[in-house]
Image: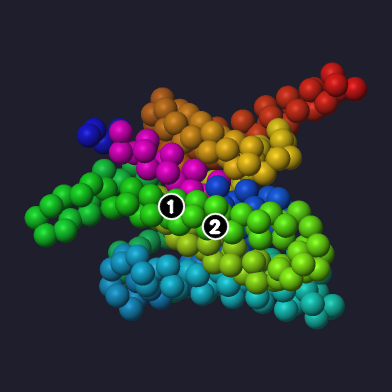
């Protein structure tokens, strides 16, 4: 397979994986929590690097999941105190954790395979040369396996717990009344978001992974309010953003991840104006 093929496949996997689970953040009106988690997982990733001196998946996932849950928990605690507004609690929590991560990166960047540019922007173009070797067998690019595994876990999570995720997203009070804990499912969703962020982190970085999480779901909810269609549309929008972003980056010789976010933003703007015009025509 050519290098171009692997980059495009990886880009599609990153966009679809993030968009699938990120659509629930949009439905819950918690989009900024996705931004917070994408930044706050950094210290967990760095600690995983420091402990293993490698990019082993399990330590990274454990560290990131712990930081993601800590972000959600601290934000809730500050909000429930009644003395801090929700947006202030979220901002203070994730900037504090992200700043700790940046300090760790700058202090130990000579000892581990991680730098600040990788943290912020990622580099998906290097995917074809990051191989997964088992014994003497070359199984292909390592990020493809990581993202494929994350996508399978996300799809299974949504399909197995579709009812709980749907009712806690649309009507938390009803969920509480029928014995489904909105708080428990909130934290489970945050754990899955953290896992997804880890899978895409080194490819698109802490900043642009937010676009992957939120834009597909935001576009889908503009076009439909039916959850199955929302999930299907996130896949379509993610794939369009990935492929369009790759070829646009090739033309302008610029960041692939950056252009993926730009193409996604353009799709969102078109969907916003299109849905508004359609609503006017229907009235």
Q: Nearer the viewer, residue 137 or 127?
A: 137
Q: In this view, does 174 lie above or below 281?
A: below
Residue closest to the far front = 178
Q: Which residue is drawn at 24% across and 33% down?
A: 2
Magenta part of the chain: 5-19
Instruction: Give the image quarter of residue 47.
Output: bottom left
Residue sitting at 22 percent across and 34 percent down? 1
User: Residue at left 49%, top 43%?
Assistant: 15
Secondary structure at badge 1 equals helix
Labels 2 & 1 near each other (Cβ < 8 A): no
Q: Is residue 228 depicted above or below 153 in this figure?
A: above
Extreme residue toward the top, this view: 281
The quadrant in which residue 45 appears is bottom left
Of discs 2 and 1, which sits in the foreground? Answer: 2
- Choose between 138 and 82: the one closer to the eye: 138
Outermost residue, right side = 283
Task: Tell me the residue that label 1 is attached to.
Answer: 152
Q: For numbered disc 2, what is the local secondary structure?
A: helix
Residue 22 visible, this angle:
yes
Q: Is residue 107 magenta?
A: no
Question: Which of the labelled discs sits on residue 250, or is there none?
Answer: none
Between 153 and 3, the one lying in front of the other is 153
**Label 2 sits on residue:** 160
Residue 146: give x, y in percent of width and height.
36, 55
């Amino acid at each position: 397979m050519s290098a171009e093929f692997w980059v495009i496949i990886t880009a599609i996997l990153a966009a679809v994986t993030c968009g699938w689970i990120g659509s629930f953040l949009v439905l819950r009106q918690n989009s900024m929590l996705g931004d917070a988690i994408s930044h706050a997982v950094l210290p967990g990733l760095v600690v995983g690097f420091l402990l293993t001196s490698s990019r082993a998946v399990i330590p990274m996932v454990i560290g990131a999941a712990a930081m993601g849950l800590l972000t959600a928990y601290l934000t809730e605690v500050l909000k429930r105190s009644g003395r801090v507004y929700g947006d202030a609690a979220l901002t203070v929590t994730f900037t504090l954790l992200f700043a700790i991560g940046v300090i760790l990166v700058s202090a130990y960047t000579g000892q581990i395979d991680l730098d600040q540019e990788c943290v912020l922007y990622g580099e998906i173009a290097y995917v074809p040369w990051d191989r997964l070797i088992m014994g003497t067998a070359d199984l292909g690019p390592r990020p493809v396996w990581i993202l494929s595994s994350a996508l399978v876990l996300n799809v299974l999570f949504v399909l197995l717990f579709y009812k709980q995720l749907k009712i806690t997203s649309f009507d938390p009070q009803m969920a509480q009344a029928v014995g489904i804990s909105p708080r428990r499912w909130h934290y489970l969703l945050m754990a899955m978001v953290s896992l997804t962020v880890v899978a895409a982190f080194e490819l698109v970085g802490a900043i642009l992974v937010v676009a992957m999480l939120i834009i597909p779901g935001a576009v889908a909810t503009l076009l439909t309010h039916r959850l199955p269609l929302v999930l299907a549309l996130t896949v379509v929008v993610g794939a369009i953003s990935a492929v369009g972003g790759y070829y646009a980056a090739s033309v302008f010789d610029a960041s692939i991840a950056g252009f993926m976010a730009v193409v996604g933003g353009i799709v969102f703007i078109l969907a916003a104006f299109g849905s508004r015009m359609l609503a006017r025509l229907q009235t």
